[in-house]
Amino acid sequence: MRFSQMFVPTLKEIPKDAVLASHQLLLRAGYIQQVGSGIYNFLPLGKKILDSIRALIKEEMDRIGAQEILMGFITPAELWQESGRYNQYGKELLRLKDRKDNEFVLGPTHEEMVTHIARSFIRSYKQLPLHLYQIHTKFRDEARPRFGLMRAREFVMKDGYSFHSSYEDLDKEFVRVEQAYRRICERLGLEYKIVEADSGAIGGSGSKEFMVLAHCGEDTLAVCKNCDYGANLEAAKRKDRQTPKDEGKYGTQAPKAAFAEFLTPEVTTIESLCEFFKIHPFFTIKAVVKKAVRQSQVADSRGDSLSTNDCKFAEQICNELIVFFVRGDDECEETKALNALNALGKHHYLALEDAPSELLESAGLKAGFIGPIGLEGVRYILDEGLRDAKDMITGANKKDYHIVGIDVSEFEELRNAHYADIIKVREGDLCPHCAEELQYAKGIEIGHIFKLGEKYSHQMDAKFLNHTGKAQNLVMGCYGIGVTRLLPAILEQKSDEFGCVWGENVRIFDVVIIVSNIKDSEQMAYATKTYEALLARGVDVVLDDRDERFGFKMKDFELIGFYQALIVGKTLSEGKVELIKREGLQKRIIDASDALDSVIKSTITNDNIESTNTHNLRSVNAK
């Protein structure tokens, strides 16, 4: 294509609301246009780079035997009601009605729809395993869309779903997909980390996230300095703590008392408690009081719950006080705490919020003096690290009093209490695998894989006949990649002060031919001949034939991030031209007569070779 005919609306000024470098570059270089909060148009260059990434992902998914489909962007609400997620998903799920008052949702994910496909057609174990995927538009009504394509409301995602006759078969597919995702990240040239993660609203287990490491990442990761362990803070674990070696302000001596009640007037914080008793916060139990939010189902006139198909949910929000107990020098991790609460199975809670003081008072709780012993009328969960704790200090559940010298295992009410991992891992905590120190890193989530198990097949009655002829729930896996999110992820790692850099295997054209002076007939004739010859050889080439200054054209080359540029200038009279690779701005002078072959050779990457080399593919799979 000739540059003079291309629609590339570049911007000179950085948009004021664009904070991240990737967001600024995608707007300035004419890749995208914002049309609403978290909603973007993909202009020709944006569509071209999106197609390049899409093709790479499709190639890897097809290699492992996954089959591409295309599901409806709009999903009947009754499918979400069957799965139970219609009310659980929250306000991010955009609900709407058609002219006949039929309810629908704009799909943020498609577990319900694909399960409906499976239950409609899968009858026997002989049809399994089956892996279906799509690369399609999604919509999630984010409360605070920001950072451009990083957190948009409308986005393109690769979502895949596998169906199996056994959990052993699911485990095998999980490994195959993980390897395929590794190859995708490596082909994109990304520095990434695979971390343990929370499954969120999708559910399931065995959750892993693929994180692109970047300072601007929204997710905080706990990664080991020594081994490969890494986890999102929502799922991070640590080695069991021992008595702190750092003596700190008051040393590490445990408080000396045997279940003694002490008057502690106005001592309402862990800091003031440690000051009062001159002890380390390791020996204190902190109460974190939260308001658990859930939506209650509307009952019909008989007082019975409505059927699934007729189910409508109240706007009224039900609140319940929950107390989480952790050591005084730990923090409660909210997602872990919410998951622990939902695991109790009484209700499904949507969120945890700070409990207002009036709610504590109505429950008879004394702020600053709450403890797990003798706590009545309020549900509570203790951190797993407190299970066998000794010599602890906790609130006495009455104003101005604490209890000193508690051995948790000695109290029946605590032995039978609910325990869960609810703490936030800190830098310096020890790795659960190798016991070396953990540190924080920032990451951009670009992929997530889950073992769904029977979560959806059970709820939606998706069964098959096993080899004995018995009906059995389908076992499912789920695998996602944020396709549009990959654009800013790549740029956050690779871009430089001059503009976009896409790397070897994601290209905006293989080469741009820049004519220094289009009025020079020799330069223009050579450039046109080379351009036509490259087109004939199947090279994706642009001829910059614009009547603009050479410096202006070079700035566009750098800003847009063309893979490489062939510069046709004054040195042509000496039989020389210049070839510049955008990444690193590597320059070399070549003979004008060799330019055609040099450009063609430079468009053949290691990735191109590997994609046709079965032996190499097996090697990557085995790694």
Image (spheres, rainbow, N blue to C red):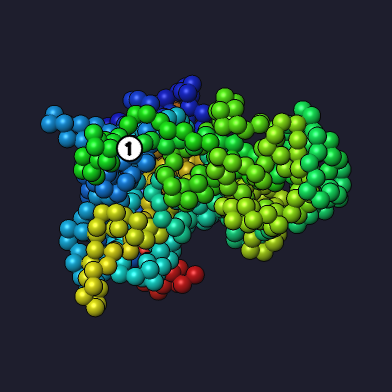
Residue shown at the point (59%, 59%) measured from the top left: 229
Left or right of 581: which side holds 521?
left
Left or right of 613: which side holds 311?
left
Which image quarter is the N terminus in?
Answer: top left
Q: Which residue sits furthest bottom? A: 468
Q: Is residue 530 visible?
A: no
Q: Which residue sits furthest left? A: 100
Residue shown at the point (67%, 50%) measured from the top left: 439
Q: Is residue 253 visible?
A: yes
Left or right of 193: which side holds 154?
left
Left or right of 452: which side holds 255?
right
Residue shown at the point (74%, 54%) measured from the top left: 407
Q: Nearer the viewer, residue 364 or 390?
A: 364
The number of numbered badges drawn on the structure is 1
User: Can you identify the residue that label 1 sits on?
Assistant: 297
* In the image, residue 465 above or below residue 306: below
Give the image location of residue 581, x and y in percent. Answer: 48, 47
Give the image location of residue 347, x and y in percent. Answer: 42, 44
Q: Amino acid at mark 1?
A: Gln
The crowding category of the residue bearing disc 1, from other C-alpha atoms within 10 Å (few below 14, some 14 to 19, many at least 20), is: some
Q: Nearer the viewer, residue 612 or 381?
A: 381
Label 1, secondary structure: give it. Answer: strand
Give the image location of residue 499, x and y in percent. Answer: 49, 35
Residue shown at the point (33%, 64%) measured from the top left: 475
Give the image location of residue 154, x and y in percent. Answer: 34, 35
User: Which quadrant of the structure image shows residue 262?
Assistant: top right
* In the image, residue 586 above or below residue 179: above
Q: Nearer the viewer, residue 1 or 291?
A: 291
